[in-house]
Image (cartoon, grey):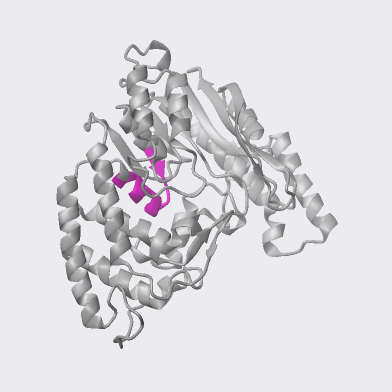
Amino acid sequence: MTPSTSTRKLTNGQANRIMDRDQSVHNWYRFVLSFPPHLVRDYLGRFGISHQDRVLDPFCGTGTTLVECRKLGVPSIGIEANPMAHFASRVKVDWSPSPEGLVQHAREVATLAATQLEADGVGDVSIFEDKPRALRALPVESEALLLKGSISPRPLHRTLVLFDVIRQLADERYRDHELLALAHALVGSIGNLHFGPEVGVGRPKPDAPAILPWLEQVKRMARDLTEAAEPRATEAEVVLADARRPSEHVGPQSVSAVITSPPYPNEKDYTRTTRLESVILGFIRDKSDLRALKRGLIRSNTRGVYKGDVDGAWVQTNRTVQRLAEDIEKRRLELGKTSGFERMYPTVTKLYFGGMARHFAGLRECLAPGAHLAYVVGDQASYLRVLIRTGQLLADIAESLGYEVLGLDLFRTRLATATKEQLREEVLVLRWPGN
């Protein structure tokens, strides 16, 4: 059923009750700078989405859209090419575990892991007086994928022991939630990472515990599961796939609305955001795994460009995109920039917008007539300070593919790191007429 003909709407009471829980229920493990849950609710309401509709998030990240839809009892499907983010989304919409059972099983895991760490001479909390055996480490090819200093040796040893015990005592009802709790603890407490415009390495934590922050995160999950909204039977599917080929995984004319935030064209390598937990939990093990991951992503930065990429062909007749690439190249020459990455800025710009054009084209088959779409996008100036009006360019591309452009809603502004100018983050609102 399309939004225009939907008959079963959410009442104001339902919406307000769920909104009050926004900061609690299932906000585990969100990407830094991900769009807020209230934005999803705002557009679900604006589009008139009901329990009889289906919402798609083709760049679902760690599942904000899917979680909000499930709270409201709205069926949803997400597409995500990053295996760690896909795992997080899938777990966050699985509300089946018993909260009490999850905590009890986690305590059993914690007890065994603590016993093993004591035997190793690396208790979860120490003052460096113990004399540990040789500390465990990652395989060389896995360690090479990490930012140097991402995690200190003792915390790494503790994490690897805890990871092994979770698998050793695996209970299918709780295992994935326990692993996601470990990923969260790695990023937030155990590792040395810090997050700004880019992920980096902060002050070392040479004796950070692993079991205690992990157990606290499990308890937080249990509290959220206790508060989870009904109905629990609401469909929430997550597919590990390439957003440029949505029709391979989403049925024809089955989607009433799209709410999503695709990557922006800049020099941010999105795979670095989840690199530490992806490596330790085994989602990527070596350079070939990382290369395969990047090949499934929209080309939004020069570190994800490969020989044979052809998405640029989708915008070869788009004068605005071509002129933008020419401006970036002109600026490069004016500034005398000669590095390999800088030479690729025009190419990745065309690949990015070509990949998004390919996404919009493939998406048409999945959309019900009258479907509405909301894309959270942002202006960029990462490529030699040449301004990229991402929202307007994507609006033009979508319109050329048959979509109706309903507007560019200002979401927020942010300060450009290089130029200190205010850049717009917008919501591109589209409608698919069903031609």
Image quadrant where one finds the N terminus: top left
Question: Where does residue 34 sit, x and y in percent of width and height?
Answer: 49, 43
- Is residue 138 visible in this depiction of the protein? no
- Against 90, residue 305 (above or below) is below
Towards the viewer: 198 or 214: 214
Question: Where does residue 288 sit, x and y in percent of width and height?
Answer: 44, 65
Residue at 29% x, 87% y: name it: 133
Question: Where does residue 432 sit, x and y in percent of width and height?
Answer: 50, 21
- Prevalent SS, magenta region: helix
- Is residue 335 visible in this depiction of the protein? yes
Question: Where does residue 179 sit, x and y in percent of width and height?
Answer: 28, 57
- The residue at the far right in this view is 334
Towards the viewer: 237 or 181: 181
Residue at 41% x, 71% y: name it: 142
Is 88 in the magenta? yes
Left/right placement of residue 188 relative to residue 416 reads left
Towards the viewer: 334 or 234: 234
Residue at 16% x, 57% y: name it: 105
Residue at 57% x, 57% y: name it: 198
Kindly indicate the quadrant of the structure image that contains residue 112. bottom left
- Against 270, residue 63 (above or below) is above
Towards the viewer: 203 or 109: 203
Highlighted range, magenta: 78-91
Kindly indicate the quadrant of the structure image that contains residue 210. bottom left
Number of labelled discs?
A: 0
Is 219 in the magenta? no
- Against 371, residue 299 (above or below) is below
